[in-house]
Every structure is written in C-alpha cells, then in structure tokens.
Amino acid sequence: MDVFFGEWLNLLLRWAHMVVGIGWIGTSFYFMALDYTLLKREKMNPGVLGTSWQVHGGGFYHVEKYTVAPPALPDVLHWFKWEAYLTWVTGFGLLIVQYYVHADAFLIDPAVMPIEPWQAIAISIGSLAAGWFVYDGICRSKIGENPVLLALTVFALILLAAVLYTKVFSGRGAFIHVGALIGTIMAVNVFGVIIPNQKKMIAQMIAGREPEARFGEIGKQRSVHNNYLTLPVLLMMVSQHYPFLFTHPQSWLVVALILVSGGLIRHVLNRVEAADDFNSYGWAVPVAAIVLMSAIYVTAPQSSGASAGPPVSDAQALEISQKHCVSCHAKAPIHPAFKEPPKNMPLETVRELKRYSTQIYMQTVQNRAMPLGNQTGMTDEERAALGRWVRGAR
C-alpha cells in the first residue's frame, strides 16, 4: 500500500473511530445516568419502574422505564447499537492498518519474542476472540451471580491478558492489545448479549407471552460492565502517545492501576448522577487519587546510567543516529511505513539532533520506545552514549 494513501486511510479510520466512539460512550453514559435519575411517583402507568423529567436544548422530556416491558410494543422503537458495532469495526480497521500492515515496526519486538508477522497477527486475532469467550463464560457461571466476585475475576482476566501480551508483543503492541481486548468485550456485549436479549423479549411479546425478566437483567449486567470499563479503555487507546506507560518493565502493573483508578472515577460519577449521599461513596475519591499517584510514581523515569562514561562527540552521536534513526527520521525515509519523518523530525545532521535532543532523550534513552520495535538492534551502550551526548549538548 502506498504510504501516502495508507496515512489517509489511517486518519479517516481514526476520525471515524472517534466519532462513533463518542456516540457510543455518550449513549452509555446517558442511559446509566437516566437509570439513576428514575423516581417513583404517585401516578405512573402500570408496570413502570420509575420516571424522569429532564430538560435539554430548550425542551422538556418525560421518560419512563418499565420494570420488564410495556404491555404492548410501540409503533416505533429506537435502538442504540450501531455506534457500538462501528466503534469496534473502525478500531479493528486501525489495528490492521497500523499494527498488522507494519507488524515488524509496531507489533513485534525480537528481544521479547522473535516471531513472524503472520504469527503475531494470528495471536492477536486469536487472543481477542479467546478473551471474549473466557469473559462470557465467567459471566454465565456461578461467579456471575456475585457482582463483587465477578468484578474481581474480570479484573484478574484482564491483568492475565496484559502479562501474556507483554511476553509476546512489543510494549506498544502489548498495551494497545489490552485496550483492544477490553473494547472487544464491550462491543460483543452489545452485539452478542444485550441486543439479542432485547430481541428475545420482543419476540416473546409478539407471540403473546410475558417477556422473561432475566433477559433484561443479563443485558443490564453487561451494560454496567461496559460503563465501568469505558474510562480505562479510553486511556489504553491514547497510550500510544505516551511511551512511559507501555515501556515500563512491568506494564501490567500500569494496566492494573489504570483499571482501578478509571473504574473508581466512573463509580464516583455514577453515584453523583444517582444523587447518593457523598458519605456512601466518598471513600472512592481519595482511593482513586492514591492509585493515580501510584501510577505516576511507578512510571517515573529511572536512572538510565547515561551520565556514567566518557564524553560523546557530535560525530559519535551522528553515527548512532545514522545507524538507528534515519531510516525513519529522514527527509526521505527508507522505512516502508513512512513517507515523511515521524512528527516531522529529521535526524540527519548534528544541528537536527541538537534541535530535538529533548525528544531523543525521552523516547530513546529514557522510555526506550525508539527505534520502533528496536528493529535496528540498538544496544544499551548506544542508548547510554546517546544520553551522555544529549546531557553534554544541553
């Protein structure tokens, strides 16, 4: 694929992913908030669980929620599903364009596991499918009847996946796959459980039977899971812009902290929507703050050893750059994934190296995120030498 058109495809998919993702997240947040604002009133239609008066955009809305279903189906029934489906489709498209097409650069790190691109892609697809089936099996088991135990088990499942991914993929590839796994679970919850269960209830009503409440209860359980997983998965998806997250030696620990903090923040927002007494959920605020501070502490830069050793000359720094950087960071890159230098940062001259020395230090010495997948085999000694040159050049 031509690099220019590949970049446009990447951009359009990313744009579409953001648009439909915002729509999906918006409806998820809205309906959770709606559930929490339902009130029982003196006069309600038969079978109504609660009602909510709302105001928005200069208009007033009166919403009713039935305990199971209304006595008869309305002429028009609005569904909220395509946003979820398209979020997954566009996300998987991005996975293909960014990670499968350029598996050598973004997905594979020979120092982690020397595998072929087709093997990495097969592991990726297989793990996403397997993760869903394991999650679904857990929810349908006896564990699913205990919300706390279920939450802990799903948390453990995601952490196990994070550990396994770090044993197979590059740090970048591992972290994005944790997000992709969570996103797959959320999307298939809608496609494979929530919508089919609603259709079963409608079919029962059309057949003149009382719809079974358990279908709605199961759908609600998966909807709540999606709601609490939303904030963590959003951070996972933007993690590629912040290498200090995925280059950590124990990035699974970073995943754990993101899951806990994101879930707690979402819990606080849900309880605020429900107008609960702050004393009943206020504990989650300091705990979330402590977890976030722990994440900052864990990902704080460690001593790189760049200061120990002889001074490094401009010529030596340029030699390292020529060997490991300019295949991508050149005005005319020879790397097949790029037509222009990433972030418009050519590193072909000493002047350019000095101009971008801070970024070089962060990405190459401190975070070790570059070269991509360490395809050129940059050694620890070369990273340390480059770090000493940067320190001397400042």
Image (cartoon, rainbow, N blue to C red):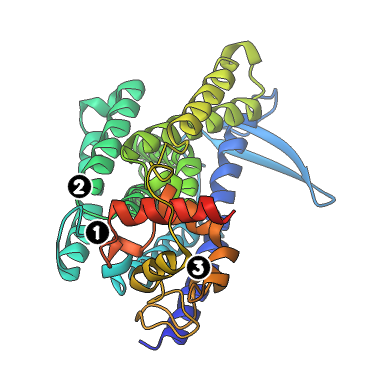
Mark drawn on residue 216: none
Q: Residue furthest top?
A: 279
Which residue does the numbered mark 3 point to in the structure image?
14
Which residue does the numbered mark 1 point to in the structure image?
109
Neighbourhood count class around disc 2 (C-alpha, 10 Å): few under 14, some 14–19, many 20 upward: few
Residue type, numbered disc 1? Asp
Neighbourhood count class around disc 3 (C-alpha, 10 Å): few under 14, some 14–19, many 20 upward: some
Q: Secondary structure at mark 3?
A: helix
Instruction: Tell me, yes or no, if residue 78 can be seen here.
Output: no
Image side of residue 249 versus residue 257, left or right = left
Neighbourhood count class around disc 1 (C-alpha, 10 Å): few under 14, some 14–19, many 20 upward: many
The image position of residue 73, as x and y in percent, is 50, 51
The image position of residue 366, as x and y in percent, is 43, 47
Which residue does the numbered mark 2 point to in the structure image?
167
Q: Secondary structure at mark 1?
A: loop
Residue type, numbered disc 3? Arg
Between 392 and 229, which is closer to the camera in this rendering?
A: 392
Instruction: Tell me, yes or no, if residue 356 can be seen here.
Output: yes
- How far apart are labels 2 and 3 at the CA level? 28 Å
